Every structure is written in C-alpha cells, then in structure tokens.
Image: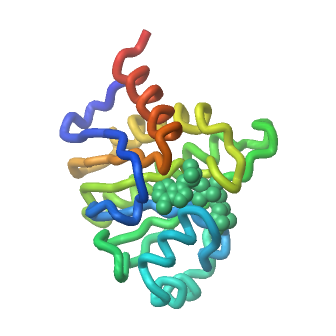
C-alpha cells in the first residue's frame, strides 16, 4: 500500500521524543489534556508550565481527535495532542479510534503547514494497546492519510526503547514490501 504523495518519508527513530528538532511532536494525551505520565509527562516537563495553562483553555479532547498547541520550551514549534483508545481487548472500536489518532494528527499538521512530525507509539503504554497491532494500524493509517496531505511530510515513528523501535521498523518494512 503506497501513498500517491511521493514527497514524503517515514522513518524510525529511537529515544526521547522531546529531543527531536521537528516542526511538531505528537503527544499521547488523555481527554483532559492537562498532563499525565509516560510521554505526556515528558512533554509537559520539557515544554514547561505554560503548556498546561494553554491546554486548560482547550476544553479537553475526545478519543481519536487531535488538538494543536505551541511547543513552548521544546525545540518543536508545535504539539499535536491526541487521545488514544484504552485497550479493552480489541472489540470496542479500538483499532478505528487508534487509526483516527494518526490520521487526524497528520491532517491537522498539514493544515498548519507542518512538514516534519514525530509520533510516539500512541496507546502502547498506560493504555495497554498491544504494540505490534498498534504499529501496523499506525503505519497503514499514516500511509492512507498522506494521500490527503497537500504538503510534503517527514514522519518519524519514535520508539522510546529498542523493542518499540524494532516493532515500528518491522511494520514499515512490511508496508514497503507488500506480499
Ligand atoms: N519519548 C518517546 N516515547 C515515550 C516517551 C518519551 N519521552 N515516554 C514514554 N514513551 P504512554 P498511552 C512511550 O503511556 O499508552 C499518560 O498518563 C511509551 O514507552 O505515554 O497512550 C496520558 O496522560 C509507549 O511506547 O501513552 C494518558 O493518561 C508510548 O510512549 C495515558 O498515559 C505511549 O505510552 C496515555 O497512555
């Protein structure tokens, strides 16, 4: 499944997402948008307290949707906060909601003129989504959404640890070389 948007790349990077000098970092937030643990905690810590003040005025975010904020003290100019689904076993619409997180984040980025964007493994920590399944859904959703982007895109799939980075790479390789 290749995108007809040829001016893009999708690559894996391992490490702390807050350190990436991209246009926008995606945050795996919760519906309050007021911070939490995991990557959300790391992003709020690195962005500084102004982020929470700003988020308090956004009225939260529904699962599968995305909202934009400045990056404040981060090198990234923007943050895209999206709320992944909590894993309940896979029969409660989790896959469609997770795909929406990636799609809506990418399309919102495109509307804002953002080119380079880094995604964490949304829902794969506290929210308990099996990372192999989540990774396949993410890559498929991003490839599909690229077709609807007007601008070039540089997409980084970020694995905090080596295992997640390998999972991302495995999904990417299979999408690049469909059976
Ligand atoms: N850089 C990159 N990836 C990271 C980082 C980091 N600094 N820190 C963690 N990860 P999680 P969720 C990875 O739990 O499952 C929060 O409390 C982590 O290893 O951050 O969507 C929110 O407020 C995992 O692979 O997000 C919500 O309440 C991935 O990021 C809830 O957690 C996602 O793990 C959201 O849960």
Between 144 and 10, the one lying in front of the other is 10
Q: Quadrant of ligand 1?
A: bottom right
Q: Residue at x 26, y 48 (%)?
A: 153
Q: Is residue 62 visible?
A: no
Q: Position of residue 84 (x, y in %)?
A: 62, 55
For the N terminus, the image quarter is top left
User: Relative to 68, is 66 on the left or the right?
Assistant: right
Q: State the residue lying farthest toward the front.
A: 162
Q: Is residue 176 left or right of residue 90?
A: left
Quarter residue 25 falls in: bottom left
Looking at the figure, which quarter contains the C terminus? top left
Q: Seen in the image, is 114 located left or right of residue 86?
A: left
Q: Residue drawn at (50%, 76%), measured in percent from left and top? A: 44
| Quadrant assignment, res 32 | bottom right
Res 166 visible: yes
Q: Is residue 62 above or below residue 135?
A: below
| Image spot of residue 142 (x, y percent) | 42, 41
State the residue in front, 109 or 74: 74
Q: Position of residue 20 (x, y in %)?
A: 32, 60
Q: How many marks?
A: 0
Which residue appears at 62% of the width and 47% of the height?
A: 124
Q: Is residue 57 above or below residue 10?
A: below
Q: Residue 60, percent across and down?
A: 62, 76
Which residue is found at the position 59% from the left and 63% from the top?
38
């Amino acid at each position: 499944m290749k995108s007809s948007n040829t001016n893009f790349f999708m690559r894996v990077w391992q490490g702390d997402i807050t350190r990436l000098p991209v246009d926008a970092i995606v945050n795996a937030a919760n519906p309050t948008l007021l911070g939490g643990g995991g990557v959300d905690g790391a992003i709020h810590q690195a962005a500084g307290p102004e982020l929470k003040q700003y988020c308090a005025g956004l009225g939260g975010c529904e699962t599968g949707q995305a909202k934009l904020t400045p990056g404040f003290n981060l090198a990234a100019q923007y943050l895209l906060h999206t709320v992944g689904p909590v894993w309940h076993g896979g029969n409660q619409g989790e896959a469609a909601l997770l795909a929406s997180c990636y799609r809506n984040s990418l399309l919102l980025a495109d509307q804002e003129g953002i080119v380079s964007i880094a995604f964490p493994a949304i829902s794969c920590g506290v929210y308990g989504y099996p990372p192999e399944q989540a990774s396949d859904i993410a890559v498929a959703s991003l490839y599909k959404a690229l077709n609807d982007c007007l601008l070039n895109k540089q997409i980084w799939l970020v694995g905090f640890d080596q295992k997640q980075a390998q999972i991302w790479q495995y999904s990417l390789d299979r999408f690049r070389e469909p059976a």
